[in-house]
Amino acid sequence: MLIFIENTPRAYAWGSMDALAEMLGTEPTGEPQAELWLGTHPGSPAHVAKATPVGQTLIDLVESDPERYGVHGGPLPFLLKVLAIGAPLSLQVHPDLDQAAAGFAAEEAAGIPRDARERNYGDANHKPELLVALSEVTALSGFRPLQDARRDLHALAAAARAADEVAGADAFEAAAARLDRAEPETMRRSFLEWAFSDDAACAAALAAFPAVLARLTPDVDVSAERLTALHELWNTHPADPGILVSLMLHLVRLAPGEALFLGARQLHAYLRGIAVEVMAASDNVLRAGLTEKHVDVAELCRVVDAAEMREPRFSSLTLRPGLTAWRPDVPDFQLLRANLCDPDGETASNAHESAPVIEVEATHPIVLVVTVGRIRIERLATEFAEVASARRGQSLYVSAGEPIRLTGSGEVFLATVGDC
């Protein structure tokens, strides 16, 4: 079945004031809208559009016939999102399966309410995630080489000294020295513990930041991208320890169509841009700064993968003309992108190779969202042919069965179960 679905964007402080409204063809609400959730996650399940006089969620649909509409008789193991990032998200890491199961069981046994501020685990699932940029996206993603972090800390120390912030200069030098004492992963965890400690040097480093930022020269002291990010982090989260933690991470700028894959335990934060994201259906988050929410430093340091990430970007596969796939080594999800052009070859998006007709297998249920133009979705090899026409911002749930045929002019993202 081809079923239109919809949802109300989630309003978080880091959201954009107008990007999601513009995509969905609605009026801005006057508050930041951050995420559109398209799946069966109980935190915000999608709704079946125009179904019956009584509202029905995608959870209700799956539960009405789990074998027909679910995956292995249960809910969708993935959650598709559209993100409108108007300000930096919190630095965060997600547990692996074993850590999530153990952490959830321990907090349940301890009787910690699931909505408690100090709660770390809302479910027993992991949360790997894949992000594909629709606009330029900037992000902090994974630990970078220690020598790069030391270099920038020395540059901050020099700027602090030039600004007569002696205590701050000494603090930055001491922080750099912390990264040259032991095995790299141990040093990174030690730095995280220090950033959230009551150490006077940590406080002095943060206190010196306004003067330091005024002194730093782009591409001489630090890269222009890093300086811009530090300014933005300070403006949105002044004196937050996460600003220090950000110096340990890769700063990545994604062009439209480029992707990041964040496996379990990878420290990251998205800073700005519009993107499509697919993840395992979990909401487990351990935060590491840039937030007013709970930060459990001990659990963070236990869960985080402190190894260096060599390449944050994740490569796509071209399956056939117009059809691209991102297939990380997880069973929960994969993401496809189809670019369609009209029969004369005119395309609504010139950024990627396109085709006039694209067929997509539907071995498992699919959730799709149109991001450019208008797409026609057909399933013809059935007793009763099914056809839907979706414009930019509209979404569909596609039940498992015969392949679907895509035509029209535009771009559509399709999430389904992993191919591994």
Image: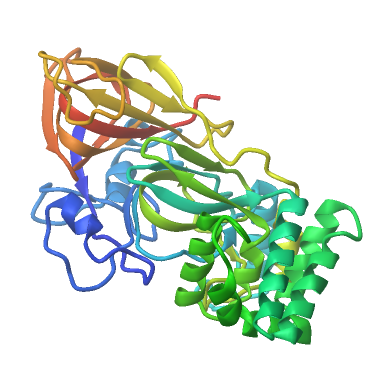
Residue beneath the point at 61% across and 76% down: 212
The relative height of residue 221 versus residue 339 in the rendered view (above or below) is below
The relative height of residue 168 versus residue 104 in the rendered view (above or below) is below
Q: Tell me if 109 is positioned left or right of 9 in this view.
A: right
Q: Is residue 150 visible?
A: yes
Q: Tell me if 200 is positioned left or right of 398 in this view.
A: right
The relative height of residue 150 versus residue 166 in the rendered view (above or below) is above
The relative height of residue 372 versus residue 37 in the rendered view (above or below) is above
Q: Position of residue 86 (x, y in %)?
A: 35, 63
Q: Quadrant of residue 377?
A: top left
Which colour assignment does the render follow?
rainbow
Q: Is residue 198 visible?
A: no
Q: Quadrant of residue 155?
A: bottom right
Q: Position of residue 294 (x, y in %)?
A: 58, 76
Q: Quadrant of residue 245?
A: bottom right
Residue beneath the point at 51% across and 29% down: 315
Q: In the picture, which quadrant includes the N terminus?
A: top left
Q: Tell me if 58 is positioned left or right of 253 in this view.
A: left
Q: Tell me if 135 is positioned left or right of 292 in this view.
A: left
Residue beneath the point at 57% across and 55% down: 219
Q: In the picture, which quadrant includes the C terminus?
A: top right
Q: Position of residue 107 (x, y in %)?
A: 65, 69
Q: Position of residue 118 (x, y in %)?
A: 60, 77
